[in-house]
Amino acid sequence: MNNIKELYELWLQKAKDEKEIYDELVAIKDKDDEILDRFYRNLEFGTGGLRGVIGAGTNRMNVFTVNQATQGLADYLNEAFENPSIAIAHDSRINSDVFAKSAAEVLAGNGIKVYFYPELVPTPMLSFAVRKLNCSSGIVITASHNPSQYNGYKCYDQKGYQITDEGAAKTYAYMQKVDMFTGVKILDFDKGLENGMIEYIGQDVYDEFYKAVLNECINPEITKNSDLKIVYTPLNGTGNKPVRHVLKEMGFKDVTVVPTQEKPDGHFPTCPYPNPEIRQAFEEAIKLSNEIGADLLLATDPDCDRVGIAVNDGGEYKLMTGNEVGVLLAQYLLSCKEAKGTLPEKPAIIKTIVTTNLISAVAEKYNCEIYDLLTGFKYIGELVTELEAKGEVDRYILGMEESYGYLTGIHARDKDGVNGASLICEMAAYYKATEGKNLYQKMNDIYDQYGMYMNTLLNFAFAGAEGMDKMKGIMAELRENPPKEIAGMKVTKVSDYLTSVATDTETGEKTVLTLPKSNVLAYALPDGNSAIIRPSGTEPKIKIYVTAVGKDRESAQDLTDKISEDMKGFIGVK
């Protein structure tokens, strides 16, 4: 726990030149709770980098915390690499451009060459640039789909995926040694441009990214002649130009962008929670579609690494989950590649442990191997890189996670909303042209064939210092006293990814889990049902992933409700 009063007084002295920060500090004078929340801890630097509310204090995103993290990263890079370089990008959020330039100044001040995107771009374009420009690292300033008061700092390694546990630990160790007010080296941004330490990323990198995404199309003859009517919203983020460019190049002629959410705006005025996982993100698109009609609604989150859809089914817009879209993409890619004779002998799909097992049922027909990894697309990117190193990358069909993240191809090592949007539109055009079906109808065909897999995500917020302690207590209690039954079903196996041990509850037999350690508990139930619980790595939340398998939607929903109620009881939430 930080010495809160001392820190507050220090910031009052040192932050006078940063007017917004200083004014905020003055405004909370004598408000102990407000001061505590800003200073009780430092923003944690992990494999997700930094993420927090924008504002004053050690527990906030501001130029001081960004500079401290960047100085730590610079020290690590200078130790680990000879002549290191870095690529930097940012999204549309409040102060994203400020934080990106500030990070560039620190890196240049430490003798590290900076390649800087001249405008906001999607996160996958940062991953692409790291590899294309042979950089040692990358930074993107974004808080993904969080509300407008948040911002973040994602750090990438030289292979283009988010920094690994080892790299994050080393960077954090260096950060701990940095005095954020006196220990940061800075070179003015304009001077960095003049002397070549900072260089804008050129159009050629954009063009090669677009080419790589377009190369992932497998039925271009369908898209060039499609009458699919698309309404797209970038949710005031980075997807506007790239997604529209790629869809146009594919041949889609009827694409309408939601005007109220077209331009970059970090306040997200029409969508306070710009997350394509929720219906609110589609409200403006649905309003527009009710006027002009559309087959498919498409939404990318502010940094355009996630994409969600709603499908016009008889005049009603049905939102589809990330799991459902992933299953559809798996079915589409595997079946079309098989029909074209381009399916490899042993195809591979990579997903996370919280992503639907319906993928496995679909993949079995195609002799497709499923890799289950921890939550976090960096693990998928890491495995793609391993397959590439072994000369097996041609096996790779799709990487996906239930939170609306998808990637085909090897152009990036992070989920890619541009790539995802293009494939979803291609898939929708294909089924419309060849079967006269929309994606909702096609998904129901899959359920009819394999059974109803209902996957539900429950989120529970625990804000502030007390909330963090409560989350730790919940996870500790569950480890000490694991549930024996959930929804009247016996828990058959408990997997603890923090201790790397899975326990068969009937025999007591223990097996070693080979995935990296993570604060995750998984409860296996009969007939493919399950519940997984973990604290979020980027938000003060506990997440519970419920899988219910039934013969139809009604029975699966009933089982979902029962599992959810029991899991809420275990964590003390009504």
Image: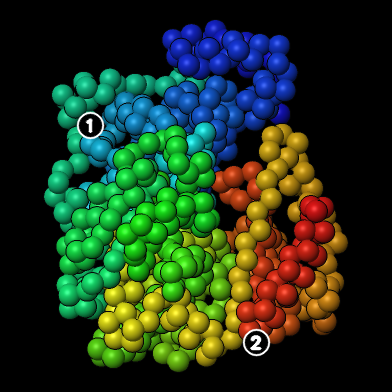
- Using the rendered view, name the quadrant where residue 483 is placed: bottom right
Under circle 2, the secondary element is loop
* On-image quarter of the N terminus: top right
Whether residue 144 is situated above or below residue 310 in the rendered picture: above
* Nearest the eye: 461 or 443: 443
> In the rendered image, which residue does mark 2 sit on?
551
Separation of marks 1 and 2 at Cα, in angstroms:
59 Å
Spot occupied by residue 96 in the image (x, y as percentages of width and height): 39, 33
The chosen color scheme is: rainbow
Report the disc number at residue 198. Answer: 1
Foreground disc of the pair 1, 2: 2
User: Looking at the picture, does residue 414 appear above or below residue 178?
Assistant: below
Q: Residues within 10 Å of mark 1 (few under 14, many from 20)?
A: many
Circle 2: residue type: Lys
Mark 1 and mark 2 residues within 8 Å of each other at the beta carbon: no
What is the x, y in percent for residue 500? 67, 65
- Residue, x 59% and y 67% (percent of image)? 354
The numbered mark, 1 or 2, whose residue comes first in the sequence reads 1
Residue 292 visible in the shown view: yes
Query: SS class of the residue under badge 1?
Result: strand
Residue type indicated by callout 1: Ile
